[in-house]
Amino acid sequence: MPEALEWTGPRVADNGVVEQSFQLGCAAGPVPGVLWLPSSTVPTPPLVMLGHGGSGHKRSERIVSLARWFASEAGLAAMAIDGPYHGDRLTSPLTPPEYQARIAAEGIGIVLDRMATEWLAAVEALGARDLIDTASLGYLGVSMGTRFGLPVAAASGDELRCVVFGKFGLRQGPDLHEGLAAPERIAGYARQVAAPVLFHLQWNDEIFPREGQLALFDLLGSAEKELIGYGGPHAETKPAAIARWREFIARRLART
């Protein structure tokens, strides 16, 4: 049975894109999310799941921009949910050391598995309402979006048609809580990923060293995987890179 889904806030339509907030009832507590849909002339569109980065949330500027592009330009649905100890899961934002400490205290393995369960429960709930095509899914998320996207990709099976990962690896820098490191678990998820992957490597990444990102890319089980590299630190993302992400997802989820 799909989890209980409750629509929250106004249903907003703008330039052919419909946006609707929701809360999904899950065992560990409500999961806040947003669904973006193309015009009503596109029945049950494929869905791209958008994972935000650390200290972001489901309505971060990049997430909203990507979601609206996919809905308006590619005819795809898009969905984002707040990550653990982020967004509307809290009454006020936490600093990176604070939310990292909470994840570590709960147990990184527990949080990773719970996030995968919540993502897939949201997909099932939306599919049960005939709003999306659950047999045609994509995932896009870098940095923390990759950390929590890997278990989703590993568990999604043939329904997952494409993935954009990056800015994340098997090693982490000293600025991150040591309790977030789970290289063996991450490696296990990576080996189970079968969908085509575009992997974004930030060449001068100070958060996730280049060698660890390359090691993660090597482990991905996908028969089709592409590595793209850009100069600059972890937080830098060039517009050309975002365009590559969008094109990779849109081309593989397009209906012919």
Image (spheres, rainbow, N blue to C red):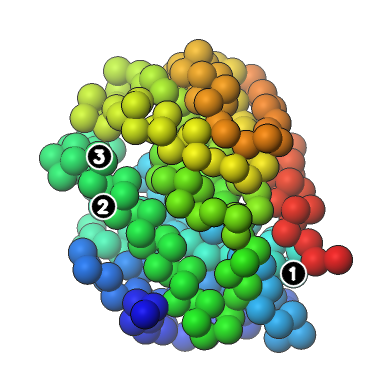
Residues 169 and 16: in front is 169
- Residue with the most extreme top position: 211
- Say which element carries label 2: loop
Considering only vertical position in the picture, is 250 above or below 219? Answer: below
Q: Is residue 244 visible?
A: yes
> As drawn, is 250 to the left or to the right of 93?
right
User: Is 162 above or below relative to 198?
Assistant: below
Image point (55%, 31%), residue name: 220
Q: What number is the disc on residue 255?
A: none
Q: Mark 3 points at which residue?
A: 108
Amino acid type indicated by mark 2: Tyr
Q: How far apart are marks 2 and 3 (CA)?
A: 13 Å
Q: Give the percent coordinates (x, y) of residue 96.
A: 28, 38
Please report the residue visible at 76 percent of the width from the left and 85 percent of the height from the top. Answer: 41
Task: Tell me if I can see residue 61 in this picture.
Answer: no
**Label whose residue precedes the other's in the sequence (1 or 2):** 1
Who's the residue at 34% across and 33% down the image?
185
Judge left or right: residue 85 versus residue 150: left
Q: Residue type at mark 1: give it.
A: Gly
